[in-house]
Image: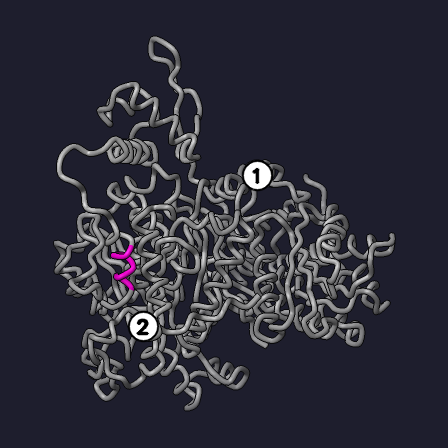
Amino acid sequence: MGAIPNVEQGTAVGAKKRRVGRPTTLESRGGSLAAILSLIRNGVATTRLDIEREAEFGRAVVSDRLATLERLGLIEEGHLGPAIGGRAPRHVRFRAEAGGVLVAQVDRASLAVGLSDLSGVLIVEHHEAVDLSDGPDAILERLTVLFIWLLDERGGKSRAWAIGLALPEVALIDANDGDVFNAAGLDVLQAWRNFDFATELSLRFGAPCWVRSNTQMMTLGEMRAGGARGFQDILCVRLDRSVSAGVASDGRLHRGSQGYSGLIGHAPTGEAEDITCRCGAKGCLDVVASGEALAREALAAAKDGRSRYLAETVERQGDVTANEVSHGAQLGDAFCAELLARSGRLVGETLAPLVNLLNPAIVVLAGALAHSGEILLAAVREAIYRRSHPLVTRDLRIVRSELAGSAELIGAAALALDELFDLPRAREWVPLGMPRLQPSFVDSLAAAKAQRRRPQASPPSPSPAP
Amino acid sequence: MQPIGLGPHGERPFPADKLVLSDPEAERARAGRFAMAVVLHTTTSDWSRQELAGIVATLEHHDATIFEIVDCRFDKDRQNKELLRLANAPIHAVISLPIGTSGVLEGHRAVVEAGKKLVLLDNAPSGLRPGVDYLSVSSADNFGIGAIAAELTSPHVPNEGVVGILNYESEFFVTNEREIGFRKWMGSERPDATLVRGRFVSVEDAGAAYERLLAMNDDLDCVFVAWDVPALRVLATIREGARTLPIVTVDLGDEIAKELRKGVPLKGIAAQRPFDQGAAAASAALMGLVGRSPPGWITSEGLKVTRENLDAACDALWRKLAPPPRQPR
C-alpha cells in the first residue's frame, strides 16, 4: 500500500539479524530492560519482588536493570506500598513524562495535531480547517509548523519519541494500485497517492512514524479511551463528510489484507440511483447519507424553498454544510430534521448486516454527524434493531463517541506507543534511553536521506514558515 | 465573518447569537426555576463582567437564579475546592471557566458526578468527555481573533521586521488558539516577518516578561500580548521607562479602551463578544436542563478595534453594565 508502510518497515527492516547461539550480554540486557520496563509501564509489577516474580529474573539482575532504567530517566521511585511482615515495598513508576508522541490527523476539511505523553494521554491538541486541494506538500508544511510549535512550547524536539498519523483512506492508496476509485471528484486527492508523509515527518523530527486510516485510528482511540473501552468486539462508525467503519475483533483492530477495511460508504442503498459516487457506482451510502450528501441536499432545499432556515443561511454565508443541517434541526426546521432522520435510517440499514455478521458488543457512532443531535442517532438505532437478528442485538450497545474529534489523535498515540514498546523494538532502544537512538531506525533515516540526495529524488521541501 | 476556529476536540462552531430556546423549551425552563453557579478564573476583568452580564441577563429572562459567583483568582487548587463544594450545593448546573486544560479535572468531575449539568467557558479540561460530562463550551473564535490581532499588528512591522508574542505560560486552550491563529496569519501574509515569543507565568509577571522579551530581542518592532489585563501591565511597564513599542492585544475592556483612545503605544484590539458568549453559555445550560443537547462548540466572531472605530465597537460589544460579583450565600 505505497510508501507509508515502507517507513514502518524502515524502522523494523533495519533490525539486525540475530546471531545463532547464546545472545551477547548487551542483547540479553536489552531484553531484560525492555521486559522489566514493560511490566512497570503496564502496571503488572511495580515492586522489586513482584518484578522478580513476574520477569523470572534474579534479585541482582532486577536491581541492576532498575538502576539502569532510573538512570535513563524511564522510571522513578514512587510511593511505599503496604508492608506485609517486613519493610514496606517501594513502588517504581514509569515516567510517562520522559518523552512524548506527536500525533496528527488529516481529514477532508480539517487537520488536528496533538502531543501525548508516553501513557497516551493527550497533553494538548489543536484542530483547524484546511483545504486538501492545497495538496499534500502544503499539509505537510502545516503539520511541520504546528509540530514545531508544540515542541517549542513543551520541551523541544527531543520530546518527540514517535509520530502517529491518521490520514483519509483515499490518501493511503498506492499510485500503483491503479484507478481503484473513479477519478471523478477525486482529482484533489490524486496528488496524495504515494505521498510519503511518514518518511518526511520522520526525517524532519527524527522519530519513527506510523500511519493508519482515520477510521482505524478512531477505532483504536475509542477502544483505548472512549465508549468502547473494555470491549473486545467493536464496530466503530465514522459519520462525517463520508461514512466509514472500523472493526475490532477479540480486541484486535482489523485492517484488511491491504489495510483498506472499512469503506462502508460504498455499500449500495437502493436509493438515489441517479447519483454517481466517486467510486463509479450509483446509490452508494456516501451519496445519500454522508455529510457531503446532506450538504448537497440542503443546498437544493435552500434554493427551492423547502427549508426557510437553510435559505436564510445560504443567503447569509453563500453556502451550507451538514453542520447547518444539524443547526437547523436543533432550531426546529422540519426539512433538516427529516434529512438527518433519513441519513440515520440509511446508515442503520447498512450497518445491520454488519452487526449480523460480526456480532459486536458495541457500536460507536463518531464523527461530526454523530454529534448532530438525537435525531440521527435515534434513526440509526431504530434501523439497526429493526433490520438485525434479535440474537445479535439482544445485548448490543449503540452509543455516541465520547471523544468527539480527539479519537483519531488518541488512537494515533496508542498505535505509536504500542509499536514503540513492542518488545522486539523496545529491546533495541531501551538500553539507549530513547527510540530515536535505535540503531535500525538511525540506519533507516540515513537510507531515506541518501535516497533524497540522489538526482532522481524529489527536491527537499522548503523549511517551514515561522 | 463566520467563526473559523474549531473546538477543543475539533467540534464545528455554532454561532452564539443563533442559540435560542424554542418557546416550549423556554416555558419548561421557567417552570423549572433553575439555580446555577458561575465559577470564573477571575471576576475582576471587564471581560468577566461582560460575560457575567450575558449569563445573568439570560438566566433572569428564564426565571433562573444565580446561586453563587465564584472568583478563583487564577488558582487551580481554589477552583477544585470551590467546585467540590458546589457539587453538594442545591443547584442544577454550573457554568465554569476551567483554569487550564490540566489540574482542574477533579473539581469539574465532582460536579458531573453529583448530577449537575456543566457548561464550560473557553477551556475543556483533559479527561472530561464532550457531550457526556459537559454540555458545551462557549467561547470566542480565538483562532480568528489571533488572525485579527496579526492583521492589526502587520502595519506596524516593517519589511523583515520582528514581532514578539507575549503569551500565558499555562496550558490554556484559548490563548493557544490565539497564538496559533496569529502565527498562521503572519506565516501566510507576512512571511518576511520573524516571530519571537515570551511567556508570563502570571498576569503580574507580564511587565517583567515584556522586559525579558526586549532583553533577548533588541530588534523587536511590535508586540502582541494575549489579552488586555497583561497588556495593561506591559503598558504600565512602558510608562515606567521600558522601551516603547506598538502593542496589540485581545479583549475590549474599559481600561484598555482608554489606552486605545490615546493611540500610543496601543495600536489595536481584537475583541471578543463576552456578553454574547455568556448569554450562549446560560442558554446551553438551560437547554441541557430541559432535555435538549446544545451544540458542543458555541462561538462568536471577533471584532477588529482601532482608535478609529472604538466608540462604535464599544456600542456593539458592551450591552449593559455587568453586576458586581455576588458574595456566597
Magenta part of the chain: A4-10
Q: Amino acid at mark 2?
A: Ser
Residue B243 position, x and y percent, is 82, 58
Residue A429 position (above or below residue A29): below
Q: How is the image coloured?
A: one colour
Q: Which residue is mark 2?
A: A242
SS for tag 1?
helix
SS for tag 2?
loop
Is A353 positioned to the left or the right of B78 in the image? left
Q: Which residue is mark 1?
A: B80
* Label 2: few (<14), some (14–19) or many (≥20) C-alpha neighbours in 10 Å: many
Return the residue nearer the eye: B106 or B227. B227
Q: Amino acid at mark 1?
A: Asn
Query: Is residue A284 magenta-colored?
Result: no
Judged by its main secondary structure, the magenta piece is helix
Is A408 positioned to the left or the right of B76 in the image? left
Q: Residue at x 48, y 70 (%)?
A: A462
Return the residue nearer the eye: B235 or B270. B235
Q: Which quarter of the rendering shows the N terminus of chain A? A: bottom left
Residue B150, located in which quarter of the rendered image? Answer: bottom right
Give the letter of the chain under mark 1.
B
Q: Is residue B22 visible?
A: no
Residue A330, located in which quarter of the rendered image? Answer: bottom left
Per the rendering, the mark at residue B313 is none
Residue B33 position, x and y percent, is 57, 52
Give the letter of the chain under mark 2.
A
